Amino acid sequence: MSKTNTSTSQISTIKIILHFIFAILIVYFIWISGGMNSSFIFLLLFPLITSTFYLNKSITRNIAIFITIAMIAMIIRGHMEIMDNELLTKHIIQTVFMMITSYYIYRIVVLAIQHKVEKEEASKRLGEMEQVDRLKQDFLSVAQHQLRTPLSGVKWVLESMKGDTTLSSDTISLLDAGLIRVKDSIAIINNMLKTVEDNSGLLTLEKEPTDIVGILQALIAELNFIALKKNSKVIFTSPQSLIIFADRDKLKAAINNIIDNALKYSPNSVVNVSIEENEKDVSVTVKDNGIGISKDDLPYVFERLHRGKNAVMIEPDESGVGLYTSKRIIDLHGGSISVVSDLGKGTTVKVALPK
C-alpha cells in the first residue's frame, strides 16, 4: 500500500511539473509572437483552465500568478518607446481581465473541492450508518437466537409443572396463562428470526378474517401480570366483535408492544384501551397517564433501538425495538400509527387499520 501511494504521488508530481512547463511554453510562444500585441494572447487561458483538472487550488493559484506576472513583464519589457496611452490602457485592461478570470476560475476550483469533500464525508457517513445498521441486525439476530433457547426451557418447565396433580386450580390457571405468554413470545421470536435471516429483510403477512376485539381481550388478559406488578388497571371499551382482514399473529405482536409500554410506563394509574370503527377503518386507541415522552424524543419513537431518557430510567433492560416493529407491521397492513404525548402527563397511541 505504501509503495502504491508513493508511486501515485510521484506520477502526480510529474504531471504538475509538465503542466508548469506547458504554461512556460505558452508564455514563451506569446512572447516571441508579439507579446501583448500577439494575436494568440488568448492562449494564456489554456494553462489556467486545464489546471482545474487537478482540483488543487494551490496549482490553479500558482498558474494564475505566473501568467499575471508574465503579462506584466511583457508590458514592461515591450517597446515602451512606441507604446502610446491607448495601447498601454489596452494591455492593462487585458491584464486585469486575466486577473479577474483567474480569480473566478480559482473560486470554481475551491467550490469544486468543497463539494468533493462534502460528498466524500456524506459517503463516509452513509457507509458508517450502513455498518451500524448491519451491526444492529446482527445484534437482533443473536439476541433473538439467545432468547429462543431459554424460553423453550421455560415452556418445558411450565408444561412439566402442569402435570403435578397436587397443584391448586388457581396455580394451574396461572401456569396456563404463563404458557400462553411463553408460546406467544416464542412465536414472535421465530417470526422475527425469519425476517432477520431473510435476505430481502421484508416482513410478509398471512391475512385472514380476524376478530380484533378477541385479540385485544386476549392481550389484556395475558398482560395482566404487568398491571398487577405496576399496580395499574386496564379499562377496555369495544363492541362485542369486529372482524378485519389481517395477519392475526403479527397484528397481535404489534398491539402487544403498545399496551405493554402503556402498562410499564404508567405505574399506579389507569390505561384506557378502546376500539372504534367508521366507514373506512378500525381504530385502536391506547391512552395512559404515565411518564410521557419528551418533545426531543417524540420524533424518534418509531426508530429502531431508540429509547427516551426517562423510559431508560424506569425500564433499563428494554431493547427499544417495540414501537419500531409495531409500526412496520401496521404499515404492512395498510394502516397508520400516531403518538401524542406530554412529558409527565401521559401518552396516547392510535392505530388505524383498514376494514
Image (cartoon, rainbow, N blue to C red):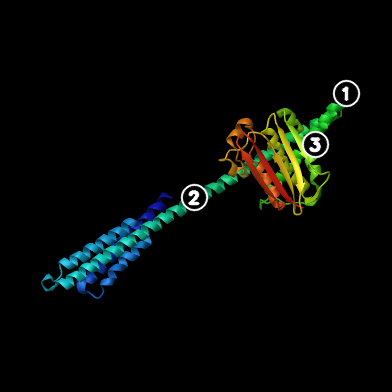
Q: Earlier in the sequence, mark 2 or mark 1?
A: 2
Kindly indicate the quadrant of the structure image that contains residue 252. top right
Residue at the location (81% across, 33% down)?
177
Give how far apart the Cα atoms at labels 2 and 3 are.
47 Å
Where is residue 333 shown, x and y percent of the image? 72, 52
User: What residue did someone put label 3 on?
Assistant: 180
Where residue 296 is drawn, which disc sits there?
none
Can residue 160 be seen by looking at this rendering?
no
Q: Earlier in the sequence, mark 2 or mark 3?
A: 2
Where residue 124 is drawn, which disc sits there?
2
User: What residue did someone put label 1 on?
Assistant: 166
Identify the element where label 1 is drawn.
loop
Kindly indicate the quadrant of the structure image that contains residue 87. bottom left
Mark 2 in CB contact with mark 3 (< 8 angstroms): no
Q: Considering only vertical position in the picture, is 294 above or below 197? A: above
Horizontal side of residue 127 vs 228, given as left or right: left
